Amino acid sequence: MPANLCITPDLGKEDMDPEVSTRMIILSSKANVSESEVVNFLHMLNLPLTIKWTCYGAMISGKDKYVKQAIKELRKLDPYGIFTKERGFAPGDPRRCRGHRYGPREGFHQMEKEFRILDYVGEALRNPREVEIEKKEPVSVDYFKEALESSFKEESNNSSDENKSEDDKE
């Protein structure tokens, strides 16, 4: 199977430029826009960015001021369904590109877990409310000892009952 070739960025230039940033744009499952709408919108902004369509939304890379400007405009489409996350590598970077690595990249499984809660995050942003966190007291040592002893007694009784029933079978 031939490699899925993608444009390899000049790693000596853009990758090391502190003014260049790459952000992943992740759509929640309840987003009011699709991946294609996001990519088309980003292209219509006509900013000097590298834009990549992805299964989770898009990825953009370029000078930090243009990336921030694009995200600011994009989030106006759906402020509660469009999320962004910093990515340390430019699109197509052979150190992280799936086309070069043949399999999920590092961090994909983390992003998959984060994706599952985005609808809840969007709902919380849409309907903010005061929250009080109840601080729980730790379990006392005496209570912990009692629970352990009780558990050991139950386990001991259960294993002796099992031995008796096996003896009855014989």
Image (cartoon, grey):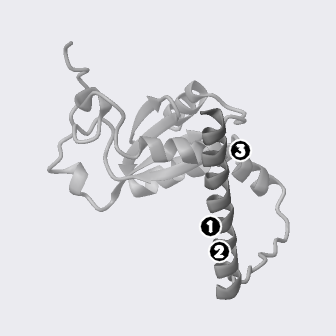
Which tag, 3 or 1, sits closer to the chain's start? 3
The circle drawn on residue 149 is 2
| Residue designated by label 1 | 152
Extreme residue toward the left, this view: 12
Give the answer, above or below, for where 72 lies relative to 93.
below
Residue 120 point in image, percent of width and height = 73, 49
Q: Residues within 10 Å of mark 2 (few under 14, many from 20)?
A: few
Quarter of the image for residue 16 reads bottom left
Q: Amino acid at mark 2?
A: Glu
Q: Secondary structure at mark 3?
A: helix
Q: Residue at x 33, y 60 (%)?
A: 19
Assign a secondary structure to mark 2: helix
Q: Quadrant of the C terminus?
A: top right
* Occupied quadrant, residue 77: top right
* Mark in the foreground, 3 or 1: 1
Is residue 46 visible in the rendered structure shown here? no
Q: Earlier in the sequence, mark 3 or mark 2?
A: 3
Q: Is residue 80 left or right of residue 112?
A: right
Q: Do the numbered discs 1 and 2 sit on residues whose CB atoms are within 8 Å?
A: yes
Could you say which disc has been placed on residue 119 in the image?
A: 3
